[in-house]
Image: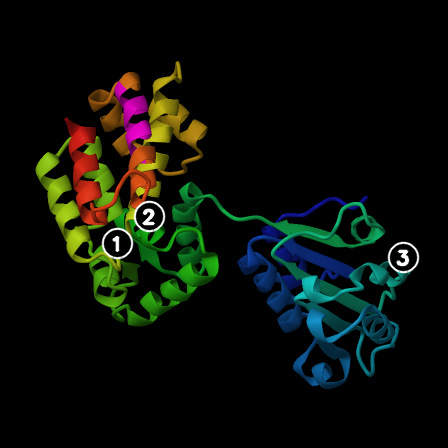
Amino acid sequence: MAKELGFEEIKQDILSGKFAPVYLFQGDESYFIDRLTDLLIKNGLDDSERDFNQIIFYGMETNARTVIASCKRFPMMAERQLVVLKEAQGMKDIDELVHYVKQPLRSTVLVINYKHGKLDGRKKLAGEIGKIGVPFESKKLYENQIPAFIIRYLQGRNVKIEQKASLLLTDYLGNDLSKLTNELEKLIISLPSNNAQITSLLIEKNIGISKDYNNFELQKAIASKDILKANRIAKYFEQNPKNNPLIVTLTVLFNFFTNLMICHYEGNKTEPHLMSVLGFRFNFQITDYIQAMKNYNPAKTMRIISLIRTTDAQSKGVDNVSLPDGKLLAELLYKIMH
């Protein structure tokens, strides 16, 4: 079976002109699937070869017989042809492609773009692709991996970003990479010509995220038990509920205190070790946890996790008939920090 390559390895092979007969890009994260598919479309053929040697199908609009027939053609005045099956999860008889994959033409590059899941591993198609082609599973990134993704993405565009700004974007946009990269491109366009660095102020001006009143700053205020600052942020959230939904704030706080509990029960509490345990890559990501361990012991941390669960249930109407989200958050913050 062929070795399963990572995104960067596949990307470099494509850019260097090293092509496989069959690619299977599948998984829950559409961003990496689309990036690799676009790279093959851009680099698989010269511009002069595309008219006769590039065919793009969509799963809902085609069938295995049509795709196989196209794959078995020989290229016209070119070294190879490129056959791309987008949205392959929509093709009802996709498993029938196994009849081609068992004996693919070396002059054809077949790209299977399969989103929102994976091919049935019990069927033969996935196994046959693994023998002769390049299978790649595109997995969702965890939110603690997003700041590193932002930094890498911007490095590729020769742009820097403030640490706080990367956390602001993570807090506001989460791990939807397509949405995130779209916003990053907007920010790149808005950069002044004499300064290629994205700042929290630039984000506030162009995306509408407050650099002072957001979940990242709320987490920092709670970690340091800055009651006044936490209450100011909660008041801002209450006045701007559309941009600051309670469910997002509760998710951030739940993740924070769950990670804090992990930190408490680690024997080695040095920053490098805790960063490794939590999957952080940058020192600034662990700062709040180091501070919070001083202010919230394990027993208090466990109670807070329970309080967040209760508030989440109340926000959905359980044992709560009158308190709006803003009041629920204010009450939760009081219980956390007192």
**Gap in Å between the C-alphas at discs 2 and 3?**
47 Å
| Residue pointed to by mark 2 | 248
Give the crowd class for mark 3: few <14, some 14-19, many >=20 residues within 10 Å.
some
What is the secondary structure assignment of the residue under circle 3? loop
What is the secondary structure assignment of the residue under circle 2? helix
| Residue pointed to by mark 3 | 102
Query: Quadrant of the rendered structure where residue 90 is?
Result: bottom right
Q: Earlier in the sequence, mark 2 or mark 3?
A: 3
Where is 236 relative to 73, above or below? above
Q: Which mark is residue 35?
A: none
Main secondary structure along the magenta-highlighted residues: helix
User: Which x, y percent locates residue 120?
Assistant: 75, 50
Determine if the magenta segment contains residue 148. Answer: no
Which is closer to the viewer, label 2 or label 3?
Answer: 2
Residue depicted at 78% across the width and 46% down the height: 2
Give the crowd class for mark 1: few <14, some 14-19, many >=20 residues within 10 Å.
some
Give the crowd class for mark 2: few <14, some 14-19, many >=20 residues within 10 Å.
some
Q: Which mark is residue 244?
A: 1
Where is 193 relative to 320, above or below? below
**Gap in Å between the C-alphas at discs 1 and 2?**
7 Å
Query: Quadrant of the rendered structure where residue 17 is?
Result: bottom right
Residue depicted at 76% across the width and 65% down the height: 92
Kind of residue sitting beneath label 1: Asn
Q: Which residues are magenta?
A: 300-308
Which is closer to the viewer, label 3 or label 1?
Answer: 1
User: Which x, y percent locates residue 338?
Assistant: 14, 26
Kind of residue sitting beneath label 3: Lys
Kind of residue sitting beneath label 2: Val
